Image: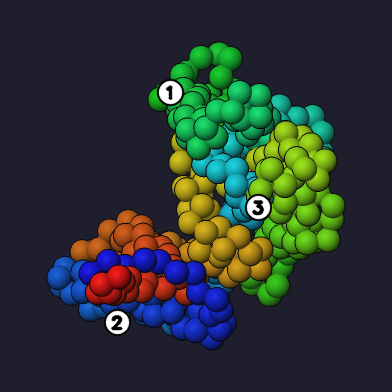
Amino acid sequence: MRFHVVKRENCPLWKKLGMYALAVAAALVLGGCLLLAMGVNPLAYYGRMFTMGMVGNKIAYKAFENYLKVFAPLALTSVALSLAFRMRFWNIGGEGQFILGAVAAATVAFKLGPVVGEGLTLVLMCLAGMLAAGLYGLIAAALKVKFGTNETLMTLMLNYIALYFITFLEDTKADWNFYLDPTSVRPIFGRFANLASFPKIPIGKFGLNICVILTLVVGVLVFIYLKYTKQGYEIAVVGDSTGTAHYAGMKVGKIVLRTVFLSACLIGLAAAFKVGTAGILSTNITDDVGWTGIIVAWLSQLNTLAIFIVSALISMLHYGSDVAAATFSQVDSSFANMLQGAILFLVLAADFCTRFQVLPVKKEGKNNGNG
């Protein structure tokens, strides 16, 4: 028997949400089976993971502060990637753009921190991070527009160039390398938290990092930009059909360059927030947000509001897994990556079921006529 895939005319919202909830539940059951095989109580592990160790913790506010340090860069990077994805420009270079943005922001902190005030230093760090990441992303966009290169391959390769660059900075102990700690015998990155650090808003004992508020503000601005501006409309048209965009008189090449530059700039801003909060560079400064942001953007179906919700859940998964791993020694913190992959696969399968249906092909009757 043969089958063919038919697009569904309409799928109610409640049914979509139900399918997604079942997919997540199935992933958790799959993870639970793996935990049982390792001799770990799944309910105890999941309880520790989803509460992030805050239940019964006298310094739970500290755990929530650390959780927000994971959430803000992921949410902003995911929003940034969704800009390019809406235009069907597959920006897989979030990792590289984040690294370049972080290096540029750290450069400003080291060089201008002792000269200008902390407030101006933080502003310049953000601008430098945005400019460096934006120009790095623009390389792939320009090659795409000029020569029709594959942006997926180009941005992927640029990731590794950026990674090798920051590894070179960490491994090279020389007089010119001001990124390193001069007091250390072996080459390690130096701290600049005393020169520039993003402030916290005190709420009792809890300190709300201003980067979280700025991330939410940027998310609102991106939503307005996409929904209510001419540039946002052009992104949607180019994403639907470049032929239609050309027919409507739109300068597609210019739109691609502008949008990818903006997308990479926002990733650079996320990097500046991250490095300005950490106060130090590192080869794993990204925490894989460039890769995870792709998953978040697609799970959210490129919806800005949904991106923040999914980012909050994925951040809970990652940070909670680190906390749970400290309690359950049998389980590595990378368990979160496996669980995240299972959730992505099953949610995409559920999304397929809400969009399409598989029907059997009816056999045509034989013509038995004699005539």
Along the line of sight, the residue nearer the viewer: 7 or 290: 7
The CA span between labels 2 and 3 is 44 Å
The kind of secondary structure element at disc 1 is helix
In this view of the protein, which residue sits in the foreground, 297 or 186?
A: 297
Q: How many residues crowd mark 1 within 10 Å: few (<14), some (14–19), many (20+)?
A: some
In the image, which is nearer the foreground, mark 2 or mark 3? 3
Q: How many marks?
A: 3
**Which residue does the image show at 49% across and 69% down from the upper left?**
7
Q: Which residue is mark 1?
A: 171
Residue at x 49% of width, y 84% of height: 15
Return the mark for residue 43: 2
Up the image or down, 55 lies above or below 263; here it is below
For disc 3, the marked residue is 240
Label 1 to label 3: alpha-carbon separation: 46 Å
Point out the tag, 1 or 3, that comes first from the N-terminus. 1
Q: Which badge, 2 or 3, is on the more N-terminal residue? A: 2
Name the amino acid type tagged 3.
Answer: Asp
| Residue type beneath disc 1 | Asp
Q: Position of residue 233 (x, y in %)?
A: 78, 54
